[in-house]
Image: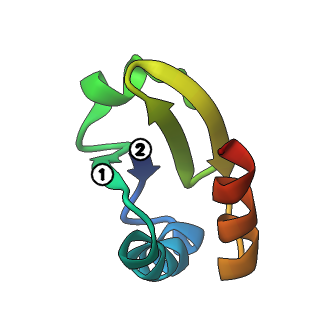
């Protein structure tokens, strides 16, 4: 599974989720592509991201399986991922 992770350096929820995401990546077969909302503006535009961060877009090939938005607990993240399968 591929995940597009969109965060920002000024976003406190993003900093918290970055730590949690590292733990999740080691538990699942996930390829993560990370973008910063401000520094990667052109790349981020194509994903139609709203105002709330962070945004995790789960993909199977080019097909979007789902989006997880905002700060989540480890258990919520795992539940979301397992719900995609």
Q: Classify residue 42 as left or right of residue 83.
A: left
- Closer to the camera, 74 or 61? 61
Quadrant of res 48: top right
Question: Where, quadrant-wise, is the N terminus in this rendering?
Answer: top left
Say if mark 2 contacts mark 1, CB within 8 Å: yes
- Closer to the camera, 23 or 70? 23
- Closer to the camera, 32 or 35? 32
Q: Position of residue 47 (x, y in %)?
A: 47, 23
Q: Residue at x 55, y 25 (%)?
A: 64
Q: Classify residue 55 as left or right of residue 36.
A: right
- Closer to the camera, 64 or 45? 64
Q: Which numbered disc flags the more N-terminal residue, 2 or 1?
A: 2
Q: Secondary structure at mark 1?
A: strand
Color encoding of the figure? rainbow
Taking 81 as reference, is 61 above or below it? above
Q: Position of residue 7 (x, y in %)?
A: 43, 54
Quadrant of res 18: bottom left
User: Number of numbered discs present?
Assistant: 2
Q: Farthest residue toward the front?
A: 85
In this rendering, does residue 51 appear at all?
no
Q: Residue at x 64, y 39 (%)?
A: 67
**Label at residue 31:** 1
In this rendering, does residue 22 appear at all?
yes
Taking 44 as reference, is 29 above or below it? below
Q: Position of residue 3 (x, y in %)?
A: 42, 45
Question: Where, quadrant-wise, is the C terminus in this rendering?
Answer: top right
Q: Between marks 2 and 1, how big is the CA–CA gap?
A: 6 Å
**Label at residue 1:** 2
């Amino acid at each position: 599974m591929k995940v597009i992770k969109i965060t920002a350096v000024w976003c406190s929820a993003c900093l918290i989720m970055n730590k949690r995401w590292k733990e999740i990546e080691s538990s699942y077969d996930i390829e993560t592509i990370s973008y910063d909302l401000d520094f990667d503006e052109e790349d981020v535009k194509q994903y139609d991201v709203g105002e709330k961060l962070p945004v995790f877009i789960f993909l199977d090939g080019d097909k979007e399986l789902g989006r997880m938005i905002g700060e989540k607990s480890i258990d919520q993240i795992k539940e979301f991922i397992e719900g995609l399968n």
